[in-house]
Amino acid sequence: MKIKISSNSFPTILFFLILVATLWFSIEAGTCRPSGRLRGKNPPKGKCNRDNDSECCKHGEVYTTFKCSPPVSHHTKAILTLNSFEKGKDGGGPSECDNKFHSDNIPIVALSTGWFNGRKRCHHNITIFGNGKRVNAIVVDECDSTIGCDSDHDFQPPCPNNAVDASKAVWKALGVPKKDWGELYIHWSDA
């Protein structure tokens, strides 16, 4: 049986396909919207650690906050950032999963609030794909997307909702030259 489509129905079919695609994209994009805003204050003198080119909050600047992150899949897109998990470094306080500091020579990460999922990913491995390589890393902390600009967060702004904040061991394992450490587009999945 052949289905014959007249040239008069083509605009209707095209309109329907565009409508379906638009709805699908808006549903996908709507899975994680900002949850609020935070107005920055200048940190007390000498209190914002600038290690690893960390950003300090700026007085009056408005920072977007998120309680969610994009959906997790086998190919979750993210931004890999550099963080220290050692005491006195730019990571702020001890790790959220165990209230301890960790060596930066171990492949460990902090995930944005939505991906951290209320500690449900604590001490689980994720696989990070970037720079043509992959590495497994242990989740030990939250990269807080809901709050920042305070002493608990080393007077740094809230994390974006798509950050994998990684120790230098992760960057080394991915073979990224040290001069390029800081931000890298990657994808990750639960291991």
Image (tube, grey):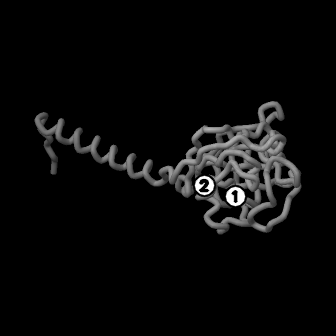
**Residue 50 drawn at (x, y percent):** 81, 39
Residue drawn at point x = 78 percent, y = 44 percent: 44
User: Judging from the image, what secondary structure is the residue with disc 1 in?
Assistant: strand
- Please identify, in this view, whether the residue under mark 2 or under mark 1 is nearer the observer: 2
Decide if residue 47 is on the left or right side of residue 115: right
Decide if residue 7 is on the left or right side of residue 181: left
Residue drawn at point x = 13 percent, y = 43 percent: 4
Determine contact: label 2, label 1, CB under 8 Å.
no
Q: Give, as a three-letter code, the residue at label 2.
A: Thr
Residue drawn at point x = 81 percent, y = 45 percent: 47
Asked if one can make out residue 136 in the rendered structure from this viewpoint, the answer is no
Residue annotated with mark 2: 146
Task: Work out which residue is located at the far top of the displayed protein and give it.
Answer: 179
Residue 62 sits in quarter: top right
Q: How many marks?
A: 2
**Above/below status of 11 relative to 115:** above
Decide if residue 40 is on the left or right side of residue 152: left
Q: Quadrant of the C terminus?
A: bottom right
**Residue 165 drawn at (x, y percent):** 72, 49
**Above/below status of 42 relative to 124:** above
**Residue 92 drawn at (x, y percent):** 79, 53
Residue drawn at point x = 22 percent, y = 40 percent: 15
**Which label sits on residue 142?**
1
The residues bearing labels 2 and 1 have C-alpha atoms spaced at a distance of 10 Å
Residue in the foreground of this view, choosing between 64 and 71: 64
- Report crowding for label 1: few under 14, some 14 to 19, many 20 or more residues within 10 A (C-alpha): many
Residue in the foreground of this view, choosing between 168 and 125: 168
